[in-house]
Amino acid sequence: NDPFAGDSSLGSGTGIISSQTEERDEMSLYNFKLVGIISGTYESYISLVNASGDVMTLQLHEELSEGVRLVDMKFNEAIFQKEDDTYITINFNNQIKETDEY
């Protein structure tokens, strides 16, 4: 352990609170960080960034990957709905939580 590395020496530094495991494919929400939320009267967007620095912008009701759709956003988090009607939330601290309802 490097005492100067802080939390980065302990792994990726993500706070994942999960009751299930999701496939770790390239387009999995677990491979992204939430970096921006833009909410307007007629349209709303979020921006996610992956480890390579590539930014992905999603509009409300767009799919991140097959069966994972952006359904709502709040001031500090984005809410996705999965095919099985469960939800995944991600916030700016990169905490990802899977729940049955939001």
Image (spheres, rainbow, N blue to C red):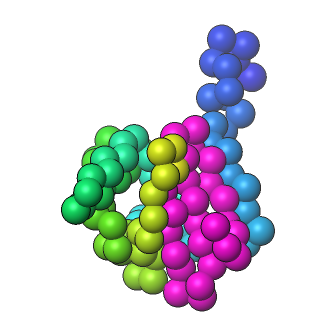
Quarter holding residue 73 = bottom left
Task: Decide: is 13 above or below 6.
Answer: below
Quarter holding residue 35 = top left
Task: Decide: is 93 above or below 43.
Answer: above
Residue 6, x across and y down, in percent: 67, 20
The residue sitting at the front extreme is 41
Q: Is residue 55 visible?
A: yes
Magenta-highlighted residues: 78-102
Residue 85, x across and y down, in percent: 59, 85
The residue sitting at the left extreme is 42
Q: Residue at x 66, y 59 (%)?
A: 97
Q: Main secondary structure of the magenta part?
A: strand
Q: Residue at x 46, y 76 (%)?
A: 68
Residue 10, x across and y down, in percent: 71, 33
Task: Decide: is 18 above or below 62.
Answer: above
Quarter holding residue 43 = bottom left
The residue sitting at the bottom extreme is 84
Q: Residue at x 48, y 45 (%)?
A: 75
Task: Decide: is 70 above or below 30.
Answer: below
Q: Is residue 53 left or right of residue 75?
A: left
- Give yes or no for residue 81 being in the magenta stretch: yes
* Residue in the foreground of this view, choosing between 24 and 58: 58
Residue 26, x across and y down, in percent: 42, 65
* Residue in the foreground of this view, choosing between 23 and 88: 88
